[in-house]
Image (tube, grey):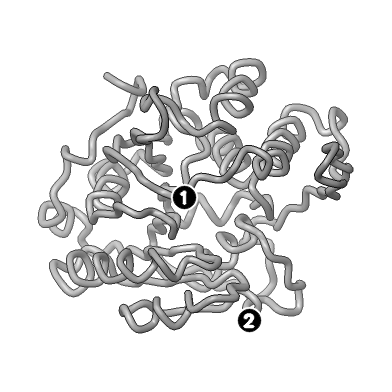
Amino acid sequence: MVGGRRSFSAADFEAADLVDAKGSTTVSVCLPARNEEGTVGNIVAAVRAELMDAPGLVDELIVMDDHSTDRTAEVAKAAGATVVACSDVLTHLGNQPGKGETLWKSLYVSTGDIVVWCDSDVANFGPHFIVGLLGPLLTDPSVGYCKGFYHRPVGADQRGGGRTTELVARPLIALLFPELGHIVQPLAGEYAGRRELLERVPFVQGYGVEMGLLIDVWRLAGPDAIAQVDLGVRVHRNRPLHELSSQATEVLQAALHRADRTLVNTAITLRRPGFGDTEITMQERPPLIEVPGYFRHGP
């Protein structure tokens, strides 16, 4: 079986069956988005028509607008999503753009017992992405966190993850966290979890969030609480190589900080000749249960 223990395929689950399995459990789908007007509307429309209006698998659909300068918010709202500007959430705690910041705030504003995240740049999105991620969580109460993995039709080898995954994340896991070596794509942007678990872990504000969450959930809940699902093929925008240095550095910071807090500075200068210097600071948001005023929804 690809991916080892507790690994599934999206084809293993049907939306109608999961509606029966969910009972009173509520589901929120949250889409972090920054300047994704070209793809976010199709994703929202598909979730709304095929999973929310009928058969009722999804109860809430939120697009978190992360300081977009295009028509992302307008397109998402027209397609049927509730649009929330990240800059309007928890304003007394500051306004910091970033992938992890957006996810943390989406957990705060959403209400579902289970929260599903999906990147908004997916060009071939299908409802099976959401159905697949929900499958293990709704059919097995011992599963608390579910990661997606997929085939990426880029270059000659379509089996692996992205460049940051293969060159940074996977070697880091092999060296420092080998118990997570079976996770096919640790940096995948499609994953889901139970609120009662997600609200108890911190969120790295930037691109290290996926690595941080995977390690922290594993430490908190154990390896058997993590499942993964093959979502098939994923087509999305690929960044040029020079744009991946900052992302890779943030992933390194998050992993090394969790292995030993003395290994790496949280504030560094990334120097790339020909591209100028980039200041990178790893900051984390605390578990939501530690945030005054947070109301935990669900049981």
The residue at 16%/39% (across/down) is: 11
> Around disc 2, counting alpha carbons within 10 Å, would you say few (fewer than 14), some (14 to 19), or many (20 or more)?
few
SS at badge 1:
loop
Residue linked to disc 1: 237
Task: List the single residue furthest toward the front.
Answer: 274
Q: Quadrant of the N terminus?
A: top left
The residue at 51%/65% (across/down) is: 33
SS at badge 2:
helix
| Of 134 and 51, the residue lying toward us | 51
Disc number placed over residue 88 in the picture, else none: 2
Amino acid on which the number 2 mark rests in the picture? Asp
Question: Looking at the image, is mark 1 or mark 2 earlier in the sequence?
Answer: 2
Q: Does residue 136 appear left or right of residue 146 in this picture?
A: left
Q: Does residue 194 appear left or right of residue 247 in this picture?
A: left
| Of 251 and 228, the residue lying toward us | 251
> How far from the left and from the top, in percent, is residue 13?
17, 44
Q: Quadrant of the C terminus?
A: bottom left
